[in-house]
Image (spheres, coloured by chain):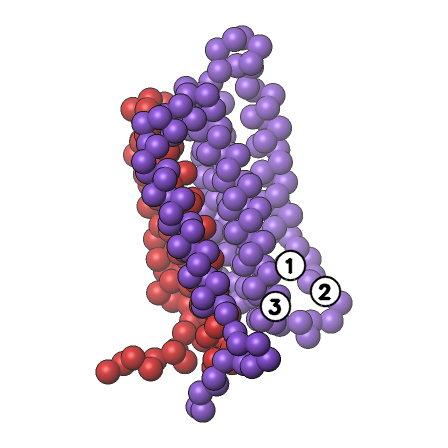
Chain colours: A red, B purple
Amino acid sequence: MIVPIGHILAVSGAMFLMGLACILGRRNLIMILIGAEIMLNAVGLALAGGSALWQNVDGQVFVIFLMAMTSAEVSISLAMVVYLRKRKGTVDADAFDGMQG
Amino acid sequence: MASLLFYILSATALVATGLCITRRNPVHAVIYLVNAFFALALLFYLLGAPLVAAWEVIIYAGAIMVLFMFIIMMLELAPTQQVGGPGWHQWGPVVALSVVLVVCTLLLIAADSGGAAGVPRYFASPRVFGYALFKQYALAVEIVSFQLLFAAVGAFYVGKTEWGSRPRKEQP
């Protein structure tokens, strides 16, 4: 290990919190998706750090599965963004409140 | 050397992410996110995952960010009325981050003498990695392939429009 695992987890956690703040704070649908990307990459960094800690490839394999999952998520959600934009003419998340009960 | 590079690259990734989530223009946010992903790819390499680093650049910084950029430009979400293009206060941070990343990459190449010494710095060579992926996790790979197929079908269904008609637009 080149650095202690705590430092890797600190970087990963800081990046995860930035992504969470982006999701919670922004109102643009594109920025919300970018926040989700940041969070998933932070998780990937934590997995790679664990893989380096235990000298085991399992963590890296899970990073690859994370990337495949992200590809699926991005394709679906960007198609949804295009559909919602066609439907209401905006990408503001506050405009899509039709299910508020 | 490697630990110093780790801290420099971590700071670069965090700064790029922080600039990304505070931009108003989505195109600028995507550019900063590409910088953050390059820094993360170098971090993956430092942590002994060269194949994951390569796929981070190819899939995230290459494919997914281009998809984001394509959607932003197709839906005309970025403000375009700025005359004269972006100024130095917008070019400066991204150029500085890119220079840091390039210098770190060159330092990494110069410091990595593993190929010559016969012992690579990383433990998970692509051969070991591929063996674990397709032997131990073969079922999971199949499930992921199904997931990608479902995602393709779902994206096609969501994006499908009837010939010569538009989706119903709600009255505000």
Question: Amino acid type of disc 3?
Answer: Met
Mark 2–mark 3 contact, CB under 8 Å?
A: no
Helix, strand or loop for disc 2: loop
Q: Secondary structure at mark 1?
A: helix
Nearer the observer, disc 2 or disc 3?
Answer: 3
Q: Position of residue B35 (x, y in %)?
A: 55, 46
Q: What is the number of the mark on residue A97?
A: none
Identified at 44% across, 90% down, the residue is B172
Local packing at callout 2 (Cα closer than 10 Å; few below 14, some 14-19, many 20+) is few
**Marks 1/3: CA distance?**
27 Å
Disc on the earlier residue, 1 or 3:
3
Which residue shows up at 46% across the image and 62% down it?
A: B155
Question: Which chain is mark 3 on?
Answer: B
The amino acid type, in three-letter code, at marker 2 is Gly
Q: Residue at x 42, y 55 (%)?
A: B151
Taking depth in this image into account, of A71 and B140 the one nearest to the observer is B140
Tell me if residue B44 comes above or below residue B34 in the rendering: above
Q: Earlier in the sequence, mark 2 or mark 3?
A: 3
Find residue B29 and report its horizontal and vertical position in percent: 54, 58
Q: Quadrant of residue A11?
A: top left
Give above or below for A87 relative to B101.
Answer: below
Foreground tag (1 vs 3): 3
Residue B99 visible in this rendered orientation of the protein: yes
The label shown at residue B85 is: 2
Residue to which mark 1 is pinned: B89
Query: What kind of element bears circle 3?
Result: helix
